Image: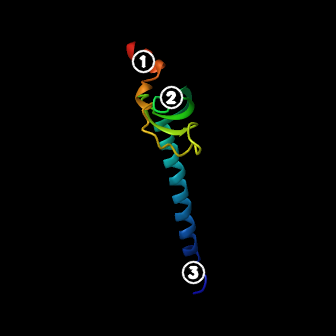
Amino acid sequence: MTGEAHWIALIPVLLGGIGIALMFWRNAVEDRRYRVEQRRFLCPDLRQKVVATLVREARSGAVIGVRSCSAFRNPERVVCTKACVPLFGRRRAQLDNAAV
């Protein structure tokens, strides 16, 4: 009777492996939804030149947020009104493709 249930120890290992694989798959799916780009421009709020990391939606090309901005002491903590987001419309390549 000993050793007959040795396969039970594999269940937590298999479930953990499946969980890790699902996390990698979900991360890959999320990466395809957004595009990240760096831009240098004049900030409409602070009236100074900044380098910002913008996040675009992949399908529409619209800027949906600011990930980081050089105007702040901690660039990752963007605490402005993000007035620059409406300034960036769709990408030029997508506009050209839409006109075709």
Residue 58 in the image, given as x and y percentages of width and height:
45, 32
Name the amino acid, label 3: Glu
Looking at marks 3 and 2 on the same chain, the residue that comes earlier in the sequence is marked by 3
* Residue 79 visible somewhere in the drawing: yes
User: How far apart are the two marked residues, 3 and 2, measured between alpha carbons?
Assistant: 73 Å
Question: Quadrant where the C terminus lies?
Answer: top left
- Mark 2, secondary structure of its residue: loop
* Image point (42%, 38%), residue name: 81
Looking at marks 1 and 2 on the same chain, the residue that comes earlier in the sequence is marked by 2
Front-lying residue, 65 or 62: 65
User: How far apart are the two marked residues, 1 and 3, measured between alpha carbons?
Assistant: 65 Å
Residue 16 in the image, given as x and y percentages of width and height:
55, 63
* Image point (43%, 25%), residue name: 87
Which of discs 1 and 3 lies nearer the camera? The answer is 1
Question: Quadrant where the N terminus lies?
Answer: bottom right
Above or below, 26 relative to 7: above
- Mark 3, secondary structure of its residue: loop
User: How far apart are the two marked residues, 1 and 2, measured between alpha carbons?
Assistant: 29 Å
- Residue 43 lies left or right of residue 62; in this view the side is right
Which residue, given by chain and number where applicable, does mark 3 sit on? 4
Q: Which mark is residue 95?
A: 1
Residue 82: name its quadrant: top left
* Residue 59 visible somewhere in the drawing: no
Above or below, 5 relative to 80: below
| Number of residues whose C-alpha sits closer than 10 Å to that of mark 3, classed few (under 14), some (14–19) or many (20 or more) | few
Which residue, given by chain and number where applicable, does mark 2 sit on? 47
* Image point (49%, 33%), residue name: 46
Looking at marks 1 and 3 on the same chain, the residue that comes earlier in the sequence is marked by 3
Name the amino acid, label 1: Leu
Front-lying residue, 15 or 6: 15
